[in-house]
Image (cartoon, rainbow, N blue to C red):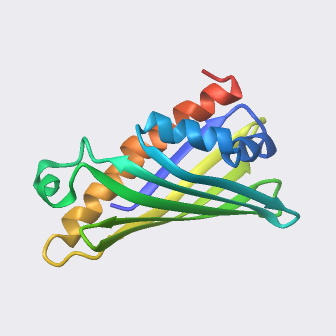
Amino acid sequence: MPIDATTTYAAAPDRVLATLTDETFLREVAAALEAQVQEVSSRADGAGATTRVRLTAATTGIPPVFARFVGRTVPVTEVTTWTPDGDGGYRGALDLRAEIMGRQAVVTCERRLTPAPGGGTRATVTGDAKVDAPFIGRQAEGAVRDLVTQVVLRHEHEVLQRRLGED
């Protein structure tokens, strides 16, 4: 099952993007995930914005079948590059990488912020996960996809709603 999540916000796409690329917001999301932040940066230019977050994430809540392979924490690097997409919205290319016992787990997604009918923003995330692990790769990919959709995006959504004053 691929990653596929959609939500809406009352705020306009420009405001949602400004929040998603704010360093304080990125630190708040990491804190909500109980992760230890090593680096957070956000750079904007005329062509868009790029955020980079390096952190160590706790592995609590992962399926027990993987717990013995993973350890208590996992180093994660997430880079998202945003560009205007011409319809009043934005397109983001997300690349998230984690190293687990010398193996790579890679999540690649397209993020879209589009004007919602009647105002506000429709936010979508679509993508997939790949795990370089013989024998358990497919199962691990499913676990990573579940973690992204059920934990990471949920916490991001909650923090974003609070920052936009929509809770």
Residue at 88 percent across and 64 percent down: it is: 46
In the displayed structure, 162 sits above or below 87; it is: above
Residue 103 pos. (x, y %)? 28, 73
Left or right: 89, with 4 as reference point? right
Residue lying farthest front?
38
Residue 74 pos. (x, y %)? 33, 56
Q: Specify the quadrant that holds the N terminus.
A: bottom left
Q: Which quadrant would residue 71 be assigned to in this image? A: bottom left
Residue 18 pos. (x, y %)? 76, 45
In the displayed structure, 26 sits above or below 43; it is: above
Residue at 24 percent across and 41 percent down: it is: 61
Residue at 46 percent across and 34 percent down: it is: 32
Residue 24 pos. (x, y %)? 66, 39
Q: Nearer the viewer, residue 154 or 59?
A: 59
In the displayed structure, 7 sits above or below 162; it is: below
Left or right: 91, with 69 as reference point? right
